[in-house]
Amino acid sequence: MDIRIDRESAVPIYLQISSAIRELILSGTLPEGFRLPPERRLAAALGVNRSTVLSAYHELKAGALVDAHVGRGTSVAPRPGAAARVGAVRPLPWRQFVRDGAMEMQDPLLRDLLALAERQDVTTFSVGLPAAELLPLDAVRAVVEELAGTVGPQMLLHSPTEGVTQFREALGELMTARGIQRSAAEVLVTSGSQQGLDLAARVFLSPGDAVVVEEPSFFGAIQVFRRAQARLLGVPADRDGMRTDVLEALLARQRPKLIYTLPTFQNPSGAVMSLERRHHLLELAYRFQVPVLEDDPYYDLRYEGEAVPPLAALDPHGYVIYLSSFSKVLFPGLRVGWLAGARPAVRQLALAKQAMDLHSSTAGQFLLDRLVRGDRWQKHLETVRSEYARRRDAMHTALAEEAPAGVSWTRPQGGFYFWCRFPDHVRQSQLLARAAQQRVSYLPGDACFPDEPPANHLRLNFTFPPPEEIRPGVARLMTALRASARKPDGDRRRGEATPPIV
Ligand SMILES: Cc1ncc(COP(=O)(O)O)c(C=O)c1O
């Protein structure tokens, strides 16, 4: 079998092997019943691990291209046509139709976490949601009534791809309050910031292009960049945000297409990039001519301390594409966010959006337009800021009192998360399942690193769970943590099965 492996490719080797064999089967080169080489032999021939070949064979089996039988090895399955002739229609092997690389996106861990968040009996620290009970439903009711009488059916029709004009103007004003000077014409309304990330990846990235991301970074962005088959260049971040000295050294060697950063109340670490580093980062972007994607959904959620201007407010040269969203302060379910930047960039992003979903929800934009203008917005911000500060303090106290020695965290000045580090003798692989048994969920830190995660971390959200659940939830999580610690004679437990998460 002629199988060529490209070790530089972003496509994992097992997928390269499975697609090469798939080609050979579909072209008829390998006939029905043909016995594929034993995994060990093929692995030796290709110079890869046996587990890589095993994964490739699994992939082919999932696509119904091969059959595997104990003792008889793996052989090419009968062709769909053969079965059809005898009257049975074989199930369509959908995995075969999914383009190469796309399967990498599937992360069962995150899927399990979302399933867990649905359960009523679980204290959910894993998601990044606002408190449901603080959403201003009365204001929504009043605004919908108002809109029905004034805007009428127009709020339920199509709207421009760039966004409803008056709403874009309101966003311009909202950004002015953050120090960002962008006119309505430089704004594109998006279906959440997540779409802004996806649009940026579609417009700017080709497979193999490099993107700078903080370590740790927002896992939703890491997924988007991976899906675009980009190379992720991690730059460590500390309490003052991205280490721009490391970025400088990196830019001297590499030419990334984008620098992705979350300077304010970073997800997951909660860090705020210092003003000095913000200036340094922009200086580097200008010197090396790299656009900056600034993700800023938490700007308004500061509970103490002085605001630091967004990068977009410090950038007179139009290098920054600014993303923000209403998902953290108001309604994640409306799926309304926005981006703003230099016109040529926004134009391309709008064209990509048009192909994707024509425009974001018209009704959602009219609704938010009314909500963000005037007193309602300020009142709501005051409510959530004071309540989230209270919950943040409740979680800080609970951690201080319940966490065993060796667990560390930073009390965030704003945003949604505590980023905790736990000792190495805690078995990460056991912790998530033990926490689920304790009816508590968190986001494992691994998901937030582009490469090998350096140490044991977890992210805890404090805004979504009801305040009275925070303390007992943290206590149960710490029980799970203690139960996951490796015993001094750790070997005795080796081989113990990891309990299922859900
Ligand atoms: C940093 C960051 N960017 C983007 C998003 C996506 O938010 P949206 O609901 O606006 O798509 C989130 C949500 O968790 C986030 O934390």
Image: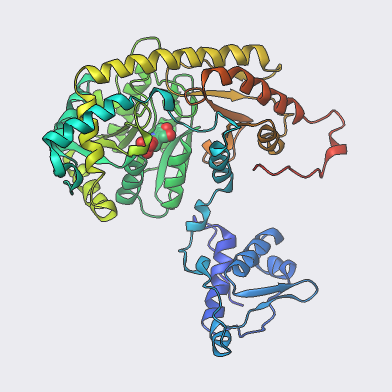
- Residue 480, visible in the rendered structure: yes
> Where is residue 108 shown, x and y percent of the image?
58, 48
> Looking at the rendering, which quadrant does residue 36 occupy?
bottom right
In the picture, measured across the screen, residue 353 lies left or right of residue 88, that is: left
Does residue 240 lie above or below 113 as drawn? above
> Where is residue 111 shown, x and y percent of the image?
54, 45
> Where is residue 39 shown, x and y percent of the image?
72, 68
> Looking at the rendering, which quadrant does residue 361 occupy?
top left
Question: Which residue is at the front of the view, 6 or 364?
Answer: 364
The residue furthest left is 150
Question: Which residue is at the front of the view, 20 or 480?
Answer: 480
Q: Quadrant of ligand 1?
A: top left
> Looking at the rendering, which quadrant does residue 122 occupy?
top right
> Where is residue 436 shown, x and y percent of the image?
66, 35
**What colour-coding does the image apply?**
rainbow
Q: How many marks?
A: 0
For the point 16% across and 46% down, which residue is it?
160
Does residue 308 lie above or below 42 as drawn? above
For the point 43% across and 49% down, which residue is it?
230
- Residue 231, visible in the rendered structure: no
For the point 66% across and 64% down, which residue is it?
53
Question: Which residue is at the front of the view, 290 or 199?
Answer: 199
Does residue 308 lie above or below 21 as drawn? above
Does residue 220 lie above or below 485 as drawn? below
